[in-house]
Image (cartoon, rainbow, N blue to C red):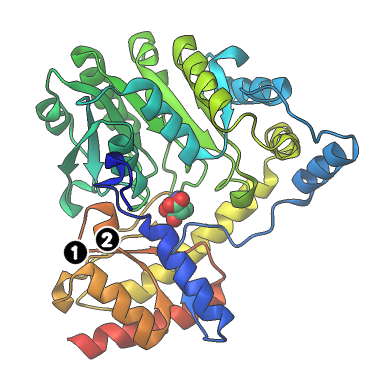
Amino acid sequence: MKLAARLGEITPSLTLAVDTKAKAMKREGIDVISFSVGEPDFETPAHIKAAAKTALEQGKTRYGPVAGEPGLREAIANKLQSDNQLCYASENVIVTNGGKHSLYNLMMVLLDPGDEVVIPAPYWVSYPEMVKLAGGVPVVVSTTIDSGFKISPDQLRQAITPNTKLFILNSPSNPTGMVYTPEEIRALAEVVVEKEIWVVSDEIYEKILYDGAEHLSIGAVSPEAYDRTIISSGFAKTYAMTGWRVGFLAAPLPIIKAASMIQGHSTSNVCTFSQYGAIAAYESSQDCVKEMVQAFADRRQLMLEYLHSIPEITCPKPNGAFYMFPNISKTGMKSLDFSNTLLEKYQVATVPGIAFGADDCVRLSYATHSDNIHKGMARFVEFVQSLV
Ligand code: GLU
């Protein structure tokens, strides 16, 4: 069968593929420990579920406005103002089917064939594929463990050509867990403004920070940076709402209007009662977030102790998100081989770094119970010892 040419260079999402494989093995009764998909193991907090249930009972089960329930757009605008010092009206916000959909919408809105998008590597698996699906050209800029896996202003400047339309910034980062400092964000903002490109700031992990790390939204750096910024985020990671599918974009009006038009012809509104859960998430106490972040912090420590006990593994201490990104090159294996063998022989699921543009690393999510971390990391250590 001849499929559309646009699919020619697209590869499947490895984060989801490994998760599917690990879940299938579990269903077969295999004792798999999964450090694969970035999905908090917590239940969605009860007050969020209750708000969605009430919405269901009240009959919020019909088509809603394409760009989102007015109450949610307002709650998002308020949150951006109070948490991020970003001044958006609710018209500047569109509610989407999760952060992934926000970014996909944005690529469809901004990119013409041949437009270049600067993506620092390691990058989240779907960025380059979304750019390609929209006809754009991913320009991948590699970063190293020595620079904390962060792109420098000079690297960004050098990657920009007359065809550059957009720069994708993700802090805290998936897959490395690194957080850009406010000074680093300011320096990148200067380049964005000087070169007159757009920046999309993927802030899905902004609340998951450790060791006093600070999140500065690039749009808050200056009015000039604000004019060139698009914010992409969602509720999945912060409130353990992965299956609810609620995300958003905040941006200048023409972008929001264009994204609404695309949604009007593709998805229509996001699940109505999910949106009422999301309103409760933003408008209620944030104690649940603090509790989950504390649990992630403890798990981070635990996983790191195991990794640092292996001389052949190098792993920087991440200060955000819930991922570790150890370098496995001293084992002599490349990431696909490493992850596949670890899963098949030791029943531990990880995502090969090649999915993120870094074949010397593997990604481990520690959004799982500490018992699983003990069990899975003991196997991980045994596996690496068997290789060296
Ligand atoms: N973003 C999460 C991850 O990287 C969920 C899976 C996905 O959408 O890629 O694991």
Label 1 amino acid?
Asp
Q: Is residue 288 left or right of residue 297?
A: right
The image quadrant of residue 67 is top right
Q: Is residue 289 left or right of residue 198?
A: right
Residue, disc 1: 360
Q: Which residue is mark 2?
A: 353
Percent x, y for residue 58? 90, 35
Question: Is residue 293 at all visible to an observer of this figure?
Answer: yes
- What residue is at 36 percent from the left and 29 percent from the top? 107
Indicate whether 31 appears above or below 197.
below
The image position of residue 118, as x and y in percent, is 22, 32
Q: Nearer the viewer, residue 174 or 146?
A: 174
Coordinates of residue 219 in the picture (x, y in percent): 40, 20
Circles 2 and 1: CB atoms closer than 8 Å? yes
**Relative side of 279 to 174, left or right:** right
Q: Residue at x 71, y 32 (%)?
A: 279
Mark positioned earlier in the residue sequence (2 or 1)? 2
* Residue 206 shows in the view: no
Q: Secondary structure at mark 2?
A: helix
Q: Which quadrant of the figure has residue 172?
A: top left
Q: Residue at x 44, y 44 (%)?
A: 212
Q: Which of the two residues, 92 or 365, is positioned nearer the viewer here?
A: 92
Q: Amino acid at mark 2?
A: Gly
* Residue 33 badge: none
